[in-house]
Amino acid sequence: MLQISDYKIPITELKTNFDVRIFIKREDLIHPTISGNKFWKLFLNVNQYLEAKPNNPLLLTFGGAFSNHIASVAAFGKQFNISTIGIIRGEELENNWQNNPTLSKASENGMQFFFVSREDYQNKEKITQEFLEKYPNSLMIPEGGSNDRAVEGVQYMLGNDTKDFDYLCTAVGTGGTIAGISRFAEANQNVIGIKVVKDDSLENLVKQWSGRRNFELIDADENRYGKISDGNVRFINWFQNEYQIPLDPIYMGKMMQKIFDLAEKGFFPKDSKILAFHTGGLQGIKGANQFLESKNRTLIDFEV
């Protein structure tokens, strides 16, 4: 069984000229290779699985070429000596995944890959059935790691240090993190999710997982996983220089840019205290820079 330690995650106030106060909680620092929310989304899922004492435990999951989730599951498996398999979207990667920084690091951490076409990847129910028949003692974790147990695990991102904030903000991909924050937030707190993906089903899914109506979903300026704007890259570079806090271009960069934009436009009432959760994803910077360099575009000027 995995144990929860007394984690101390720093909360930093960001000095701004707005009439609100913005803070960031550095969940990305919880573990050097398992980004904050991914750690907690996996924690209870894996604990429940290990309670059954499976022979040769194995974690199966889905993800794309630069998936934070794939990187985190591989790192989680290495940390706790559990075998891992990643079902990767895009069969074109099968012969050159070694050039992909996310997949090469996942492989170093012991993950095996199965590559499937983008068309076949959409039928996850069929793939899940096939893999569970082949590996009957394994744990299948959904893409992005979001399910009921993941939502429950997110409660550990909240505590006495988050109770005094008026707004709790997070990036939204598959919905598990915001659902957990919503479910376990204080009664007087408002939860804001910055969507980085086009998915009209997310609101109902979050309501189902959370059981509450204390949240609002707002689109990031570029709310598609694979799209990185030059404006967002400039913001990420500025943010690093201004606060010495790195942001990735898929989740955190888009979230913080949107929060600053909302604050500038008066979305938050005056003197509000706003807490943004830094949920990591920094491993994706290297892959993003590979893509940006191939297009002769401005690069993120740091790596972690």
Image: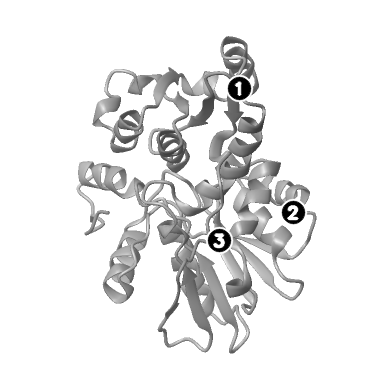
Q: Quadrant of residue 48?
A: top right
Q: Position of residue 122 (x, y in %)?
A: 57, 25
Q: Are marks 1 and 3 in contact (CB under 8 Å)?
A: no
Q: What distance separates the C-alpha of mark 2 from that of mark 3?
A: 15 Å
Q: Earlier in the sequence, mark 1 or mark 3?
A: 1
Q: Position of residue 168 (x, y in %)?
A: 60, 69
Q: Is residue 264 above or below residue 259?
A: below
The amino acid beneath tag 3 is Thr
Check disc 2 and give the amino acid type: Ser
Farthest residue, direction top: 134
Q: Nearer the viewer, mark 2 or mark 1?
A: 1
User: Considering the numbered disc 1 on the image, is that residue within a helix, a strand or a loop?
Assistant: loop
- Pinpoint residue 202: horizontal percent, then vertical percent: 67, 47
Query: Residue 237: image x %, image y %?
Result: 28, 65
User: What number is the disc on residue 54?
Assistant: 1
CA–CA distance in space, label 1 to label 3: 34 Å
Task: Find residue 170 and name its label.
Answer: 3
User: Looking at the image, which is closer to me, 41 or 114?
Assistant: 41
- Of the numbered discs 2 and 1, the one sitting upstream in the chain is 1
Residue drawn where x is 38% and y is 54% of the image: 249
Q: How many marks?
A: 3
Residue 210, numbered label: 2
Name the amino acid, label 1: Pro
